[in-house]
Amino acid sequence: MSKLNNPLPSFDKPPVVEVVVGINFSKELLIDEFDIVNIFNEMGGKDKFEYRRLPLDMPTTIGQQPFNINFSNMPQLPKYWLQNKENKNEIIQFQKDKFIYNWTKQNDQSAYIRYEKVIENFFNYYNKINQYIIKEKTEIIPSILELAYVNLIDIPDNYSEVFKDVSWNKDGKEILREPFTVNLNYNFIIEDLNKSFMSVVVASVQLAKDGRNMLKCDLSVRGTPKDKNNLVEWYDGARDAIVKGFAEITTDRMHKLWERKSS
């Protein structure tokens, strides 16, 4: 039995501030500016979204990690960035070889919406793009999928209070007694998810809005689906790996603060 099929941990107050669902296309879409406007209108148009065109040299990011893009030598359309006017938490990024859906926590009072709603929203928009492409031009062939969770955590007195495998022993040290920042990157292969890659990044950050120092923990999974006609299966497995992985690396003390309630 796959470890990813076991019951999932659940938190009533998780430190999640961003969830990103991304899909790379195996080849660039044969679309132009006219098509982009039509796709935008299919999604709800100016009544629903604030709309921006971004230069290609502006990196697409997940949290603060680059979402790598390989460009051909052919002329490129710019990136397109849409933010839901009513629900500021919802952001869409789109270009000829990629579609990304973001849920972002806008403030401390914003309620975290569960994965099931995030993935439903992602496929709602993705299917509208796909239906338009099939009708007008060609078809979307998925290649690399990605799912990422970004967490913000108050900095503790000792990093081991948050992460089981991150600590600093200052005993016997005169010079390097306590680091004031941390930057760690771990990479894993998830065998049960078609050998997808999982990255865990822990870094100290300072929030621009209020200057608070926090720990940011990004967990992202990238890989290819076994069945390109069943993308949900891959995303569900990636979610399971992220949630279980996060529970594995964090301490019982933090689980109590985040109100863990199962598994």
Image (cartoon, rainbow, N blue to C red):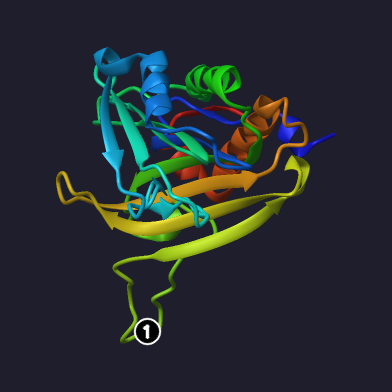
Q: Is residue 27 visible?
A: yes
Residue at far bottom of view: 174
User: Of 201 and 182, which appears nearest the observer?
Assistant: 201
Query: Measured from the top left, where is residue 99 in percent x and y?
Result: 49, 35
Residue drawn at 55 percent across, 50 percent down: 249
In the visual, does 51 lie left or right of 23?
left
On screen, residue 50 above or below 146:
above
Please state which amino acid type lies under the numbered disc 1.
Lys
User: Of 33 and 149, which appears nearest the observer?
Assistant: 33
Residue drawn at 49 percent across, 52 percent down: 74
Residue at far right of view: 1
Query: Measured from the top left, where is residue 50 in percent x and y?
Result: 24, 25
Residue drawn at 38 percent across, 60 percent down: 158
Number of numbered callouts drawn: 1
Query: Measured from the top left, where is residue 195 in percent x and y?
Result: 74, 49
Query: Measured from the top left, where is residue 21 in percent x and y?
Result: 51, 34
